[in-house]
Amino acid sequence: MSDTYGIGIIGGSGLYSMEGLHIDEERRLQTPFGDPSDAYLLGTLDGQKVAFLPRHGRGHRMTPSELNYRANIYGFKLLGVERIVSVSAVGSMQLAYKPTHIVVPDQFFDRTRHRPDTFFGNGLVAHVSVAHPVCPELIPVFTGGAREAGATVHEGGCYLCMEGPQFSTRAESEVYRGWGMAVIGMTNLQEAKLSREAEICYATLAMVTDYDCWHEEEADVSGQAVMEVIAQNVKMAQTVVRNVVGGLANLPRTCACQHALQHSLITDRALVPAQTLKDLQPIIGKYMPA
């Protein structure tokens, strides 16, 4: 069997106990950007090869701003991942998106300040389009998998990515609602941008846990409340992920994500430092061999 894993899954460790999942090994990877959040759990889900990564490390040890997003996505690239299924908790910014609902966003808005979110630099410039940051081939598979599981799912909408780890102030929450944001979270924007640079398809199953702090008739969001809703919905998340992986099993990859770098690398090949070329070979190798 090939030692590549076409589907990557990133989310909480509760996903790993799902029915149909068989873990063959845990693999720690080294990257030019440092260590990923944890070891990748490699195995099969209903016969499909998958690579799992606990986003915050097992035991939830890292804040959103401490995550090594570049190492996490680079590690998936080393494993041969072509599609990433992201599962994350979010706050709702609209009445229609209620706790326990699932949103599959098609846009992101960046309100972070302290995070590296590109593989490029150090003598190699690339300008990659993220006008449509979510793979259009994944969205219907994600929404279909959620509906099949019996979830209430909303297709489309904008995910505002804030810095954290604190939740929003009331003033911020009201502004984001006025901007028309659908949900708010702390992790997915960098994953989406880096996946596009790595030519990996990416989409999010955003699990609504709260109304942030704008809803006058609901309690303000707290860490304890979020974790309680997550615990209640682990089974649903597992079922949705299982359905999504099944839906991707025989889906041809025809989207533009796989060619995102084709016209994006700007620097003259002869001027790129040898170490940069070496470090980025898993990502740029088909365009700029070392």
Image (cartoon, rainbow, N blue to C red):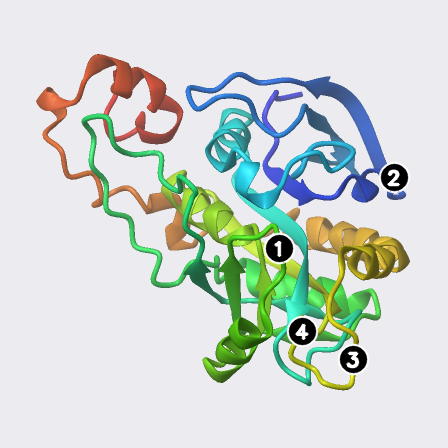
Residue type for callout 1: Gln
Mark 2 and mark 1 lie on one chain; the one further toward the N terminus is 2
Q: Residue 213 has which mark?
A: 4
Quarter location, residue 46: top right
Circles 3 and 1: CB atoms closer than 8 Å: no
Query: From the viewer's perspective, is residue 47 above or below residue 28?
Result: below
Observer-nearest of 149 and 98: 98
Q: What's the amino acid at mark 4?
A: Cys
Q: Is residue 264 left or right of residue 166?
A: left
Q: Amino acid at mark 2?
A: Ser
Q: Position of residue 40 (x, y in %)?
A: 67, 26
Name the N-terminal-most of marks 4 and 3. Answer: 4
- Residue name at image x 63 percent, y 50 percent: 86
The disc placed on residue 17 is 2
Quadrant in the rendering for residue 122: top left
Q: What secondary structure is found at the residue carrying circle 1? A: loop
Q: Tell me the mark number nearer the camera, choosing from 2 and 1.
A: 1
Between marks 2 and 3 in the image, the one whose residue lies nearer the viewer = 3
N-terminal of the pair, mark 2 or mark 3, is 2
Instruction: Give me the C-alpha separation between circle 4 and circle 1.
Output: 12 Å
Q: Which SS class for mark 4? A: loop
Looking at the image, which residue is at 70% across and 74% down?
211
The mark found on residue 166 in the picture is 1
